[in-house]
Image (cartoon, helix red, strand yellow):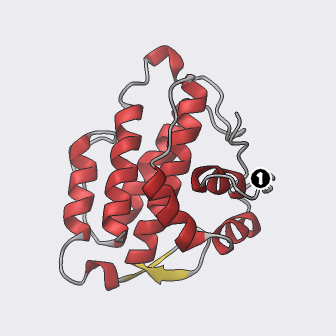
Amino acid sequence: MDPVTMYERAAGNAAELARSVRPEQRGLPTPCSEWDVDALLAHMAGGSAYLLGALGVGTAGSAWPAADVVEACVSALREPGALQRRCQSPAGFEWSVAEATAGTAMDQLIHTWDLGVALDAKRPMDPELSEAIVAMFLPAMPDIGRQAGFVGPEVEVAPDATASDRLLAAMGRNPAH
């Protein structure tokens, strides 16, 4: 699966769930112990802003989780040469915009699950997207995130666990939550 499709699916699902948040839910705790729902939403909005910034594109007048922000990001990512550009990762190393796009898709997928837990909402993870992200990022990326201080300790899961559960566990989440 190409990185733009990964981002489009993950960010689209994230935006859909984010739009369902009611004002009284914004202070609820999330699996990210330092963030309530409001802080988690701000972080999730930062994913699209990060990619748009890496491409030198702004979103004047748009506020995430508006579908137009995701669409603007996808459109910018599909421009010729966009994915080959270089940018700084949140962990401090340089990578391609293609890698940043896939990494942002992973972040959106994981945090959509976190938001679902906080809202006590359905939290199924796209199995095809989970498989693509696992193939691309496990086992290395969660360790890089742990070294940077923003991924918790890995949770043990059964060897035959689904890709979604393996990804959640690698990123410090208990899939049974």
Residue in the image at 38% along x and 76% along y: 98
Q: Is residue 145 above or below residue 41?
A: below
| Residue that carries the numbered disc 1 in the rendered image | 158
> Looking at the picture, how far across and down is residue 25, in whole percent?
52, 19
Q: Is residue 36 above or below residue 64?
A: above
- In-front residue for pair 137/54: 137
User: Residue lying farthest top?
Assistant: 24
Q: Is residue 15 above or below residue 47?
A: above
Q: Is residue 45 above or below residue 104?
A: above
> Looking at the picture, how far across and down is residue 131, in whole percent?
51, 61
Q: As drawn, is 41 to the left or to the right of 69?
A: right
Residue in the image at 43% along x and 24% along y: 21
Which image quadrant is residue 2 in? bottom left
> Looking at the picture, how far across and down is residue 55, in whole percent?
30, 72
Mark 1 Cα shell of 10 Å, populated few (<14), some (14-19), many (≥20): few
- In-front residue for pair 3/81: 3
Residue in the image at 33% along x and 42% along y: 64
Task: For mark 1, give the secondary structure.
Answer: loop
Q: Disc 1 residue type?
A: Ala
> Looking at the picture, how far across and down is residue 23, in whole percent?
45, 17
Which image quadrant is residue 54 in? bottom left
Q: How many marks?
A: 1
Q: In the picture, which quadrant includes the C terminus? A: top right
Q: As drawn, is 68 to the left or to the right of 10?
A: left
Residue in the image at 63% along x and 56% along y: 167
Q: In the picture, which quadrant includes the N terminus? A: bottom left
Q: As drawn, is 50 to the left or to the right of 39?
A: left
